[in-house]
Amino acid sequence: MRTRPLPRYAGIDLLAVVVLTAIAISGFWPTFAGYRWLVVAGAGTAIGMAWALLVITVRLGMDIVLESMAVPYLVTAGGVALGASGLLLGIPDADVVNRVLAGTATSWTTMVETAPPVDSTGAVLLIPYALTYFLTCTATAMALRSRRAAQPVVPLVAMLVLVLFLGFPQAFSVLLQGVAFGAVALLWIGHRGMRIEAGRQADPSLGVVPAGRFVAALLVVGVIAASTLPFVDSIAPDRRLVMREVVTPYDAAYIETPLSAFRRFRDQGPDVYDNLADRKLFRVKGARAGTRVRVAVLDGYDGNRWYAANDTSPTDFSDRFLRVSSRIDNPAEGDEGLYTFFVRSRWDLPWVPTIGAMRAFEFYDDYATDRLPDLRYNRSTDTAVLPGGLDVREDYVISAVPVADRLTSKMKPWPVKDEALHDAAAFLDIPAQAWSLGARTPMQAVFRIADRLRVRGRYSDGAFGWEQQFEAGQDSIRLDEGFVNAPAMVGNDEQYAATMALLANRIGVPARVAVGTVLGKFGVIKGKHLGAWVEIRVADGSWRVLETDTFMGHKAPRRDDAKLLPVRLPPERQDQPRPTEQEQPQDQPDQQPKADETKPDEPLPRWPLLLLLPAAVSLVPVAKGVRRRRRRSAASSAAYLGGWEELLDTARDLGVGVPASGTRPAQAAALGVPTTLARDADIAVFTPADPPPAGPFWDSVDEQRRRLASRSPAWRILLAPLNPASFFRRR
């Protein structure tokens, strides 16, 4: 087989492809854990360039490279990226090829749904392999065969954009991925341009770059800079577009929360089969007594219940429920500890108890590890979700850092309020204002509100006897009329925590609801140990715990308790209505005797209200009569125009279709009236001389109105005087 020698400067082109590929693919450095992804990317670069060199050398052309490069990918991807052995000499079998095809199609979503860093194992390694193989193969073929200086840079720019799009908001290195990539690309394009120009002039030496070629190179650099502009945080301070924002994350908003199911954790009597009050749920090993265990953190409210939301922060990507790798990038200050959760009873809620800021998660036994891909973790709330819950023996081990959670009234809250929660708590505006009066700081206001809730309220799970009237729920009606403004403010952790968090948000202090427990001496968690508290965001961005005892009373309600009055603002704080008339001067004597001041006001009679309906109905025909009289009494041509308008309005009130536009003869034909009537109106309107009196014309109009009515149904004739359609007709 005849071969084609490589061009004179092929080594420079191949070196440029390798350098630009290395710069582009380096953006995956914070995305993957370990170094295997780097080896896979290097293998993809080498195999892609080798395939392009092979095809070009045997004189098959650049188009053959592009059409056939899928075959080497399917042959090599299984062994290089997936580690599959395949058949003899590494040739993949059908199963390996299917895994490669499926992984290439789905691994992109898996990677962006995983909390960083992503483990360098499995199908996600097909991403760096596919990018480097296909794009370097294409760039190499273009560099060796294309006569256009900038064409080989295009696939490498595409690689850079895809790496940035698949990565994180913060670019790995703006200097490397922006400046260095652009500089190398510019030098390469300039060098290729000089070679191509010298070749056209049959000069083997490199000459000076023409001005046009240099401008073209600058344009290419400008395109590269514009491509990277949306991905550089220093230039665009807002969230840049990445695939992690495009892909819809796991939505935990619609799953049952421990707060909504809170009465399952309290004694509801012997007939409730799924009650968890006295059931041992978990035993935690490795944690000291007093360690706080979170089951769920709820940071959204829709008027019906608190729920776990995604994307609650406009500046952070950690507020999503993502898959977990062997390690989770979850920064926190403190000593990392190892905690084992032994599942003692069936836990059918999808919320997985955790401690502090979790950095690793694994199942204790190997048989449950196949459930790990279903686990989702939210680094902003430090809560985990596993659909289907946990069964007995599905024990798990977490590595986590317990975080500081102490809250005092001297701390400053986060300065930016949560607008959505602030608006959702509007129905509690009066209690929020009334109970925070006298506070000097927002945090003092939170503690004042908490104290009012504790003193005013009573505690009941609504399980037995007359207390069953105190129902579960956290919707706006239950928290307002059924709790804060009820004659007896009675509820359990569900109502107290839901209300306290809303009241805090209403005064501008970010707050959310959490469900969990504080471990006892033996680390055993029963259903009755679970409680709900409120977490307040302070100025340093951390979330601190407002203890349940701060805002929740423990006194049981009694039948003879005095009824509570609805919460009201003091008179001096209520909005003063504007006076309807000018106030009299103080030195002016009263016009009425003092005896009249003590006389009670007599109620106004209500019978005039009965006249409102017939008065409203009569407005339409009265207005039509006034309009008709004004039109007929108009001077000269205006009377003709008014007569024609009266005919059209009658048709509209009768429900007869009238052309919205067109000449008057066309409208006359559509209505079935003589066209002479339309011509008379046109002559009167468009003739310079004064037209004859409009009396005969109006008589003809009235005759045609009667004919229109005679062709309409009886109910149309009866309702036509009351139909206001003609008042809204476009003229």
Image: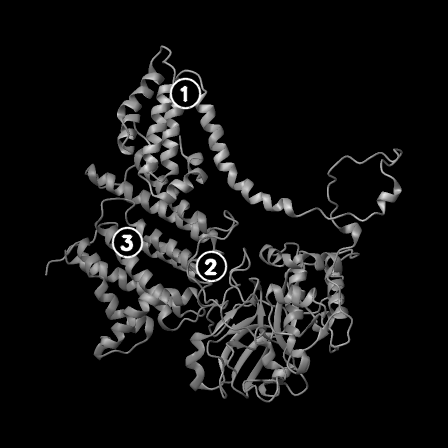
Mark 2: give few (<14), some (14-19) or many (20+) Cα within 10 Å. many
Q: Quadrant of residue 651?
A: top left
Judging by the rendered image, the residue that carries numbered circle 2 is 168
**Residue 403 visible within the image:** no
Which residue occupies 38% across, 15% down? 693
Circle nearer the N terminus (3, 2)? 3
Which residue is at 32% across, 37% downward?
A: 710
Q: Quarter holding the C terminus?
A: top left
Q: How far is mark 3 from mark 2, CA to CA?
A: 26 Å
Q: Identify the residue at image location x=20%, y=36%.
A: 201
The three-letter amino acid code for the residue at tag 2 is Phe
Q: Is residue 87 left or right of residue 25?
A: left
Q: Give x and y (percent) for residue 417.
A: 63, 55
Q: Which residue is mark 1?
A: 639
Which residue does the numbered mark 3 point to in the structure image? 139
Kind of residue sitting beneath label 3? Ala
Does dot 3 land on a helix, a strand or a loop? helix
